[in-house]
Every structure is written in structure tokens, then in C-alpha cells.
Image: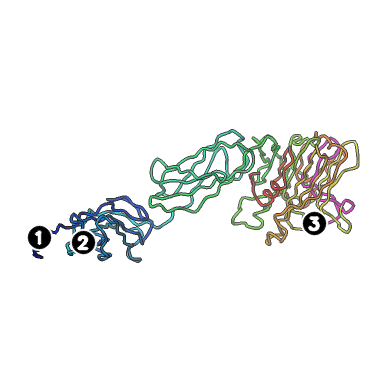
Amino acid sequence: MSVHPASAAAFNAAPSVPTEMSTSPETTCPGGSYLRDTTPVLSARFADPDDHNVSARFEVLSGGSAVWNSGYDTAAASGSTHTATVLEGTLTDGMTYTWRARGRDTNNRPGPWAAPCEFTVDTVRPDAPVVTSATYPEDQISGGVGTAGTFVFDGSSDTEAFRYSFDGATPAVVKPSAIGASATATFTPSTAGSHRLSVEAIDRAGNVSDSRLYRFGVESVSTGAYWRMDTGASPELDSAPGGAHPLVVPDGVERTDGTFRAFFPEDFPADMALGFDGDDSGATTQGAVLDASASFTMSAFVRADDTSSVTRAAVSQGGEVNGAAQLGRLASGDCPEGMATCFGFWMQSDDSTARTAVASARPVAAGEWVHLSGVWDASAKKMTLYTCAIGTPPDAFPADSGVPVATSAAVESTGPSSVGPVRVGSGWVGGEESQKWHGAVDDVRLYSSVKSESDIRMICNGDTTY
């Protein structure tokens, strides 16, 4: 029996209301979501009660008026998912839109519109988060192994979450109590030395900020003292750990541009150094910091302002009569042949006028910043001087910059004892202050251990967390 076409149309049911409405990037339907893309993909599932094939139509509206539609696409089996990409130029950042969908069967009968979904376009990435910690301040050595530290993350007003990672571990996500509020993460270090925290802010649309890299150092029991020289005009510079060895700066010693401010004043405005004219007394501690009879490392960024054949100490750990260990530059008699002066690391016992010195073959250039490290390995009975070039302002980073060059010497006896104070900017010879530095000294560090070449390389390259 045949069916009249009019009868077939009368019995043809309209397609069902579309279901599984979604977008890519993902938003929440029916509404209230933020979308980080101006060409999102709209998606829905379309079915027909008569099991006819169904074509799909999507529509985007602003203020109740259509601003874009996909037109009906190619019909597909009932129950299929259809998608459409919103035409570029349709959506504007900051505007709110609704979108909807309907199906049409092969008899050209349209179905009902689905309830509209709403989203607001937000394509602006949030600012990189601000990171702070009272226990582990940025670019400082503090805390200790096993000491938990809380890190506070602050982001833009629309920040919904923070993604963070300590030392390259699998990232974790923490959400603030409210949009735009701060959030915290806790970290308990299991090792001393340098650590890194990377943090990204994620806004409610899913936009991700630039990564914020936060470096901090965990105190080691071997850290004797360090002075960054950045305390402005204060006559006393605290050191880590806990300010146990304040460095007293005498009148007449000037504060001058530090190593990195000399090259990048806008990036490092607070970086200062101590400046010495060759006659100034050195800055001193109240007592010894290093035991030169045991292993130690002493390091500093130095700038020599003359190249005369004179021995000058940038850093000295004093003994009773002579400096037990000194770092600076040597006169020609202790240098490679043909050099009027050279960078050096030398040790001397109180009961002897002889000293053991290690000299660098790198020429001393007036005005050039260089990082020096003197390492005494008591068990191996070996002295090592590392010389690492920085450059002469304003031209930073010569071809050999950032690479420590080692010079070593075997020593028959153990090092001398240390009973006197540490001096920055002068040495100690025959019971008197001597060997006064002419130039600048910055970021002095003293460790009661042998620092590795890789650690020294990191310090030379500006990492203040080692």
C-alpha cells in the first residue's frame, strides 16, 4: 500500500532538541562561563524520533540578535554529534554572547532550538604572579633542610588558579578562596643549596600567564657568612646565617655600583658594592668566620682599578700575625712570567713569612669585573683558584665570561689556624692591616666546605642562592 506524500509529512516528527551542548575551549552550559578564544568550536548531539538523518545549524547572538550562523550542514545519522567553528571576526574580547543549535531532518522539517548557552570572551592573559615567602626570600639563602616554608601567590583580579612546580617536579594546582585572591603552597626542602619555584596564573577563561621563576637558597651548615653589600649607607652589613657575622664598614669606604648594576642599572637598581681607593681600611667582622686548617671556600666579585705590581687583598680571613687565607691579586713575583700583577689565592701561617699562592694566568684589566673563588681542600691538601670573567662596563660578557677557569697547587701541610677577623678590602701581614684593595668588592661568600666547580659557575653567573 502506498502512502500519500501529504500523509507522510503529517506523520513526520520534528528532530529532537539538541543535547550535549559544548564548546572547545570548554565552557559551562547554560551560562556564566568565560571563553579564551574568538573562534571556538560549537558542538551538540542531534537526533530524530523517526531515525531520519539530521543536519545541524548553530547560531551566535549578541543582545538577542544573531551575529553569526553556520547554516545547515550535511545531514548525518540520527544521534550524531555535529560541530561548527565560529567565523573569525565575529566575537570581540570582553563581550557576552549566547549560542544555540537546532536540527533539520531530510524532509526539511526543523526541530526546536535548544536552550541557549552563554559565555563572555576573555582573551587577555593574566599578569605573571607575584611570589613571596617570609621563610625563603627570593635570591637569598635562608631557612634550612627540613624547615617548611610557605609561598604566597598573588595574581590578577580574575585569577582562578595557580599552577606551580618546585625544582621541576610534576606541577600542582592550587585555587584561591575566591577569584582574584591569593593562594599559598608549602615546601619543605630535603637538600641545601639552590632551589627553583615556577608559578603560572590561570584566569577563569583558562588563559595562562607567563611563568614566574622564583629562586631561593636553603641554608647549609657549611655556609659561614655572606655579604651582598646592598644595604645602602648602613655602617653594618648583616650576613647569613642569622646575621651572626655582621661586617662593619668604616667611614670613607664608598658604596658604588655592584657587579650587575654596573652593566644593567635598570634591572638591578639596588645592587651595590664596597669601593676602596687603595688607602681605605677594610670592612671587618668581630672574629673569625673560617677555620683555615679545615676545608673552606671563599669567593667574591672584584673590580681592580689599577694594574701596578702590588699585592692587594679583596677578602682576607685573618690569623694572629698574618692572613690565614687571602683572595685578591698578587705582585709580579708571584705571577706567571711577564705579568705585572695577577689574580691570586694565598695562605700563610703565623710562624712563617713564606706563603703558598695560586696565581691565575688571566691578565688583570683595570675596570673589569671578575668573580674569584679560593678553595682549600684540607683532605686532598690542594688549593684551587677559580677565575670567572664578567666584563668591563658597559660591555658585559666577553667570549670567556661565565666559565670558571681553575688553577690548582698541591700543599704539603695543612692550612694555618684562623683567629682574626675577616676583612673585606684589605689583608693582614705582620700583625698589621696591609695589602689594601684598590677597586670594588661585591657579594662576598664564605663556606666551611669545598664548593664544586658547578656551584661556582652558578654563583659567577649571578645565582645568589648558592
Q: Which residue is mark 2?
A: 104
* Mark 3 element type: strand
Q: Which residue is mark 1?
A: 10
- Seen as rendered, the residue at the extreme front is 1
Q: In the rendered image, which quarter contains the N terminus? A: bottom left
Q: Specify the quadrant of the image occupied by residue 295.
A: top right
Q: Amino acid at mark 1?
A: Ala
Q: Which residue is mark 3?
A: 362
Residue closer to the observer: 397 or 351 = 397
Seen in the image, is 177 located left or right of residue 383?
A: left
Disc number lying in front (3 or 2): 2
- Asked if the residues shown at circle 3 and circle 2 are in contact, with their CB atoms under 8 angstroms apart, the answer is no
Mark 3 vs mark 2: which is more N-terminal?
2
Calculate the distance from the C-alpha at mark 3 to the C-alpha at mark 1: 98 Å
- Asked if the residues shown at circle 3 and circle 1 are in contact, with their CB atoms under 8 angstroms apart, the answer is no
Which segment is the magenta one?
305-334
Identity of the residue drawn at 63% across and 57% down: 264
Calculate the distance from the C-alpha at mark 1 to the C-alpha at mark 2: 16 Å
Res 439 visible: no
Seen in the image, is 67 located left or right of residue 358?
A: left
Identity of the residue drawn at 67% across and 49% down: 458
Q: Specify the quadrant of the image occupied by residue 236.
A: top right
Q: Amino acid at mark 2?
A: Arg
* Mark 1 element type: helix
Disc number lying in front (3 or 1): 1
Calculate the distance from the C-alpha at mark 3 to the C-alpha at mark 2: 83 Å
Callout 2: 10 Å neighbours few (<14), some, many (20+)? Answer: many
Residue 147, image x, y percentages = 58, 33
Seen in the image, is 386 located left or right of residue 188?
A: right
